[in-house]
Image (tube, rainbow, N blue to C red):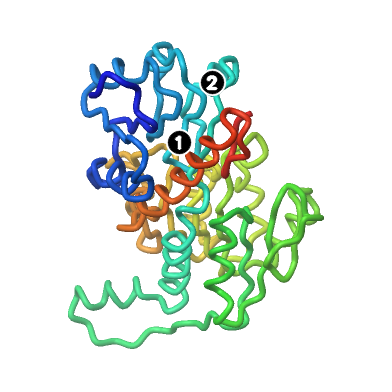
Amino acid sequence: MSDDAPDVLVLRTGTHGTPIEQYADAIRDRLPDHTVDLARTPAEEREAIENVRFVTGMTLEEELLAAADSLDVFACAYAGTGHLPLADLEDRGVTVTNASGVHGPNIGEHVVGAILHFTRRFHVGERRQRRREWRHYKATELQGSTVTIVGLGAIGQSVCTRLEPFGVDTIGVRYTPAKGGPTDEVIGFEDAAFDDALARTDYLVLACPLTETTRGLIDREAFITMDPESVLVNIARGPVVDTDALVAALRSNRIRGASLDVTDPEPLPEDHPLWTFENVQITPHNAGHTPAYYDRLADIVAENRRRFDESGPDAALENVVLP
């Protein structure tokens, strides 16, 4: 590490099995007139963060934050920030941004793939292929279905865009319905409106953050309200769904199936009953993986560094989550 504090410090934790060096290089490409350092060891992180003002990384431990005497901005490389010491960051007046928007195209495609998986019942075809069994089975059509999307942020909007060619009816659920959205209908989380939407839903897509409102949102009563032919797609957070209620619904044929990129608990234990259902598709929190992840993230971080150059700590940054 250089003696002078870099313009951008990249912390060592990577994601999706992609070397963190690629992220640092992507930022350097976008900021050729800036110094961008990558701390590759815990000791380098502790030494480098002491005087640096702009840091980016997947996480920031409390111990490392305590050593950051000059920190003004932490650019979180995840969309979610619940794992960060937000109270300490707020107390110190640090601006926190996130990676909102990075996951739109890839998770949007994942959701459409999951929906088509159940619409055309590919899981049944795969099972019969493994058995070398040439026997027809019934499939359905996506056209004319109702898809309810809980959460109309960047990911929810991306899902809507990718569903447009399929001729579906869409219902969006958000905290402030008055803001509208790209869906045919927009409702809030009020019991009557939400229950009515669940009763009309063929595919329920969860794309919301985990909050007090959404924790356990899809519970036993929700599964009873949903049509037995409906499918759950969760790319939000595992605890948005009551796992015991989901298992009970699957055992009782209260829903047609579920596609789960996130679970509660996570990772899903080897002996968990969710592994045993043939109508459950499980991916290991992998919907956000894309070769373009670091490039999209670097676009946001580089732009925010330019704004920080112009206006300092008072700059109007993209994707601010704190303060």
What secondary structure is marked by label 2?
Answer: helix
Label 2 environment density (alpha carbons within 10 Å; few <14, some 14–19, many ≥20): many
Q: Position of residue 284 (x, y in %)?
A: 33, 49
Query: Mark on residue 121?
Result: none
Report the side of 222 relative to 4 (left or right). Answer: right
Please indicate, yes or no, whether residue 243 appears anywhere in the rendered image: no
Of 308 and 247, the residue lying toward us: 308
Q: Position of residue 248 (x, y in %)?
A: 51, 49
Of 52 and 33, the residue lying toward us: 33
Q: Is residue 228 above or below residue 139?
A: above
Q: Amino acid at mark 2?
A: Leu
Q: Position of residue 58 (x, y in %)?
A: 38, 35
Of 191 and 184, the residue lying toward us: 184
Report the side of 283 relative to 87 (left or right). Answer: left
Residue at 50% x, 29% y is: 73
Q: Which residue is mark 1?
A: 76
What secondary structure is marked by label 1?
Answer: strand
The N terminus: image quadrant: top left
Q: Amino acid at mark 1?
A: Cys
Q: Is residue 42 above or below residue 254?
A: above
Distance in Å between CA atoms under marks 2 and 1: 12 Å
Q: Position of residue 290 (x, y in %)?
A: 34, 57
Residue at 30% x, 58% y is: 291
Query: Mark on residue 89?
Result: 2
Please indicate, yes or no, whether residue 322 appears anywhere in the rendered image: yes
Q: Is residue 227 above or below residue 78?
A: below
